[in-house]
Image: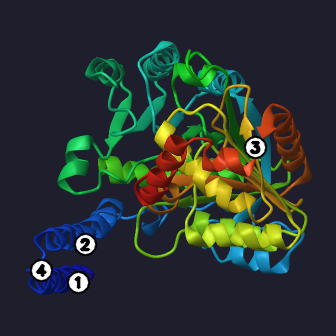
Amino acid sequence: MVWPWLLAAVVVWWAEAAVVLAAEHRRPAHAAAWLLVLLALPIVGILPFLLARGKVGLGDSRDRKPAKRSSAGADGAFPGDERLKRALRRMSDAPITGCNGTEILTDGEEAFASIFDMIGKAEHHIHLAYYILRDDGVGRRFRDALIRKAKEGVQVRLIYDGFGSWKLPKSYIRELTEAGVRVRCFLPLGAALRSRRINHRYHRKIVIIDGKSGFTGGINIGDEYLGLDKRLGFWRDTHLRVEGDAVCDLQNIFVRDWELASGEALYDPAYWPPHACTSHERVQIVSCGPRLGGNEIYDGLLAAVGAARERIWIATPYFVPDAGLTAALRTAAAGGVDVRLIVPGIADTRFVLAATLSHAADLQAAGVRVYRYQKGFIHAKVMIVDRLLASVGTANLDMRSFYSNYELSALLFDEKPIGRLERDFLKDLADSREVTAEELRGLTAGARAGRAMARLLSPLL
């Protein structure tokens, strides 16, 4: 229990305030200033803890035993660093499977075309989970496609996040449920506030079709992912389609999340159908959530950074790392590894961008090359480490993703997907501009002050 310790710390701090007040009683102005600082500091210090932790309550869905585990794909041969291999294989709920096929989808148009095509072909079930679900052009196409399949007798289940989709009208959900779609809100706003879990967000994006095809990555359901947001313009993102053993692991995650959101346990073997091994790509599906203890996505990220010998290429819309990741990237760059970071040139959230640029400035001083994307808004969450592995998923490189959100990442180990992500990254570099240290810190006093404030509040972003 940490609460008694926190309470004791506050009492001691305020006792010190009383002592200072007594010592400065002859100088009221000094005493008032000291008292204000001493009274405020413990509150400011504890606030991030309260927001980040809340109640552990539901915990990470990984704490629950999976209903099923893929039996078709044992760990494939792992090329490269032996220490990295051991670190990744220690994740008992995230095996490296060797019977998979993958396709990298580079933007919303490509991703939606593939997803809607697979939804149209569904015969038994469609399982979906999204952080953001909008009632706009894409959202209505999505709704209508699910309604059609439900009326055909296909089982359709949908999870959406209560915070990310707070603008979604009740009529949208009502039309789905009246057609037979099972819809559940993960952490509705009211329940999240009552349980002090408003900071815990369901940030996963999952699509599973008949237990045979699956999708994950950065793309939610909304028009902005097609570049239709007038302020942001072109939306650069990365999504992943998988077939094979990795779909079983996506299904395991969805089933656990569905039970948390609805109370319904799914045990029908039809959700894990047998499948032929037509391709032998290695994939590891890694998930994490807000719980005390380890974080597999973060641990795997640090292990990969530590194994790098040639390059670490990263694209992320939000870069608010903790001290551990910052130190790992600085050490890699100081050791001669080519570390490159692409962040947005246009902000969807200016305050978060200010924190991103402040943290990026620290890394640039250690030799990391920092670029700002110029073609539009970059939302891709990609990391490439040597030719050992690449990561595509929902997690940003920020403390919210590491400690507060329900996230999902796919680690890819084969030449084909890594090569495709490498080509995409080089194109993104061509559409980006390398920035100077002065630009990252801020060219005006106002910009520097804003970035300093954003940096101070980084644990809350």
For marks 3 and 1 on the same chain, the one whose residue lies earlier in the sequence: 1
Q: Is residue 11 left or right of residue 55?
A: left
Q: Is residue 12 above or below residue 81?
A: below
Q: Nearer the viewer, mark 1 or mark 4?
A: 4
Task: Report the amino acid beneath label 4.
Answer: Leu
The circle on residue 50 is: none
**Camera-side residue of 67 and 96:** 96
Q: Are marks 1 and 4 in contact (CB under 8 Å)?
A: no
Q: What label sits on residue 435 in the rendered view?
A: 3
Q: Is residue 104 left or right of residue 444?
A: right
Element type where label 2 sits in the image: helix
Calculate the distance from the C-alpha at mark 4 to the C-alpha at mark 2: 17 Å
Classify 10 Å Cα crowding around label 3: few (below 14), some (14-19), many (20 and above). Answer: some
The residue depicted at 85 percent of the width and 48 percent of the height is 279
The residue at which mark 1 appears reads as: 9
Rendered image: mark on residue 21: 4
Q: Position of residue 452 (x, y in %)?
A: 49, 54
The answer for how far apart the CA atoms under marks 1 and 4 are is 18 Å
Q: Are marks 4 and 2 in contact (CB under 8 Å)?
A: no
Left or right of 400 in this view: 302: right
Amino acid type, callout 1: Ala
- Sequence-wise, the earlier of marks 1 and 4 is 1
Q: Are marks 1 and 2 in contact (CB under 8 Å)?
A: yes
Amino acid type, residue under disc 3 in the picture: Val
**Distance between the Cα atoms at labels 3 and 2?**
37 Å
Q: Which numbered mark, 4 or 2, is in the foreground of this view?
A: 4
The location of residue 242, given as percent across then percent down, is 72, 43
- Earlier in the chain: of badge 1 and badge 2, it is 1
